[in-house]
Image: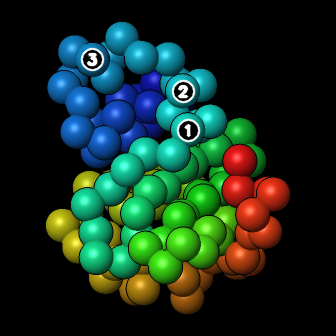
Amino acid sequence: MKRLAILLLLGAGLSARAAENTTPAATTNDFIAVESSVMDAVKYDADRRALTIRFDSGETYRYTNVPPAIAEALLAAPSKGRFFHEEIKPVFPGRRLDADARE
């Protein structure tokens, strides 16, 4: 879990030292801004295996049964939009969240 937290924080642009000194809980409860023409931010809940993506359109979707390696790969992908459309959307069940459920 700590490795995933560090990778998520590195993907958010933090240094390795800052990432190591941040608790994993912070990565699962907060959105991490990403550079993408498709999405604005992501968060991953390892306990629930849930990947939540906030898109540039303002819509937020939660994808379930997503392994940690997929969340890591999304953040590391040079094109997050392409990775999402090829590796997440067609494979993992997703649903749009209401404004109240977006946390």
**First reached walking from the N terminus: tag 2 or tag 3:** 3
Quarter of the rendering containing residue 91: bottom right
Instruction: Say if 39 sits above or below 35 in the image.
Output: below
Dot 2 corresponds to which residue? 26
- The Cα–Cα distance between marks 1 and 2, rounded to whole angstroms, is 6 Å
Disc 3, SS: helix
Quarter of the rendering containing residue 86: bottom left
Dot 3 corresponds to which residue? 18
Q: Residue at x 29, y 45 (%)?
A: 11
Q: Within 10 Å of the Cα at label 3, are there few (<14), some (14-19), or many (20+) other Cα atoms?
A: few
- The Cα–Cα distance between marks 3 and 1, rounded to whole angstroms, is 16 Å
Residue 32 at x, y percent in the picture: 43, 45
Left or right of residue 68, residue 20 in this image: left
Q: Residue at x 62, y 69 (%)?
A: 60
Q: Amino acid at mark 1?
A: Asp
Q: Residue at x 31, y 23 (%)?
A: 19
Structure colour scheme: rainbow
Quarter of the rendering containing residue 30: top right
Q: Within 10 Å of the Cα at label 2, are there few (<14), some (14-19), or many (20+) other Cα atoms?
A: few
Regarding residue 64, the answer to whether it shows in the image is no
Residue 4 at x, y percent in the picture: 44, 36
**First reached walking from the N terminus: tag 3 or tag 1:** 3
Dot 1 corresponds to which residue? 30
For the residues bearing labels 1 and 2, Cβ distance under 8 angstroms: yes
